[in-house]
Image (cartoon, grey):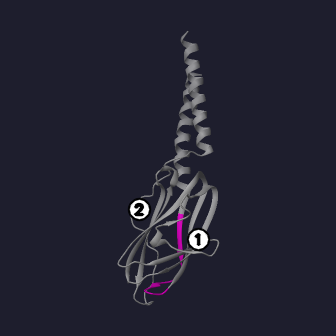
């Protein structure tokens, strides 16, 4: 009986750790979509997608936008009221107080980008928690090659060895259930040990 209880506790502990890591890594992600080459001074339409899969609930998040490159592009985002915002200028997407994300969802934001100088630009998108001093929840960087003309083929290039941060705050319902299961198993084990030692 003692070996069985110890085995159950070990299995629950391993499943808890594995489940938390898998869920956290797959919860939230960015995707940048556009077609064909990007050429200087030509407006390119595309979209930024923020996708959640059984994601932890965050009530106040924003998308932080950082751009590095040989020039200062215009990246215009269009909201649901057809208002345009230059993301390079304001450096954020979303209201100042943030917006909620939770569960399984897909938010697609249309963008129009114009690059004034040819070369390689790095665009970093970060989801930040406004309730936790703008703590970074996830981030993804894209290398964009801007051409002098449309004779070359362009692809979205992602930097090698990219590190994406996992959610820093909040727990999903599965995590709470696993924690409770581990605590109950430990209580049963301790009770059993006390009874067998008397």
- Mark 1 is surrounded, within 10 Å at the Cα level, by few (under 14), some (14 to 19) or many (20 or more) other residues, namely some
- Mark 2 is surrounded, within 10 Å at the Cα level, by few (under 14), some (14 to 19) or many (20 or more) other residues, namely few
Lateral position of residue 64 relative to residue 178, left or right: left
Q: Count numbered badges in the picture.
A: 2
Residue occupying the point 39% across, 62% down: 161
Q: Quadrant of residue 108?
A: bottom right
Residue 160 visible in the shown view: yes
Q: Nearer the viewer, residue 48 or 10?
A: 48
Highlighted magenta segment, given as a residue range: 30-42
Say if 35 sits above or below 180 in the image.
below
In the rendered image, residue 194 lying in the magenta stretch gets the answer no
Of labels 2 and 1, the one closer to you? 1
Residue 163 point in image, percent of width and height: 42, 58
Q: Quadrant of the C terminus?
A: top right
Residue 123 point in image, percent of width and height: 43, 70
Residue 35 visible in the shown view: no
Residue position marked by numbered label 1 in the rendering? 109
Residue position marked by numbered label 2 in the rendering? 162
Residue occupying the point 41% across, 79% down: 145
Q: Residue furthest top?
A: 198
């Amino acid at each position: 009986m003692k070996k069985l209880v110890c085995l159950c506790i070990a299995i629950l502990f391993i499943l808890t750790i594995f489940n938390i890591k898998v869920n956290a890594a797959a919860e939230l992600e960015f995707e940048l979509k556009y077609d064909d080459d990007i050429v200087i001074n030509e407006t390119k339409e595309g979209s930024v997608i923020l996708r959640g899969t059984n994601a932890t609930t965050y009530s106040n998040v924003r998308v932080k936008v950082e751009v590095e490159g040989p020039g200062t592009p215009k990246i215009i985002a269009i909201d649901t009221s057809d208002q345009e915002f230059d993301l390079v200028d304001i450096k954020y997407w979303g209201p100042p107080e943030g917006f909620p994300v939770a569960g399984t969802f897909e938010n697609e934001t249309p963008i129009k980008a114009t690059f004034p100088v040819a070369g390689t630009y790095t665009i970093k998108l970060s989801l930040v928690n406004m309730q936790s001093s703008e703590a970074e929840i996830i981030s993804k960087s894209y290398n964009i090659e801007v051409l002098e003309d449309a004779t070359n083929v362009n692809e979205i290039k992602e930097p090698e060895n990219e590190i994406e941060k996992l959610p820093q705050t909040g727990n999903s319902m599965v995590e709470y259930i696993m924690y409770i299961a581990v605590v109950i198993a430990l209580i049963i084990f301790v009770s059993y040990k006390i009874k067998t030692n008397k």
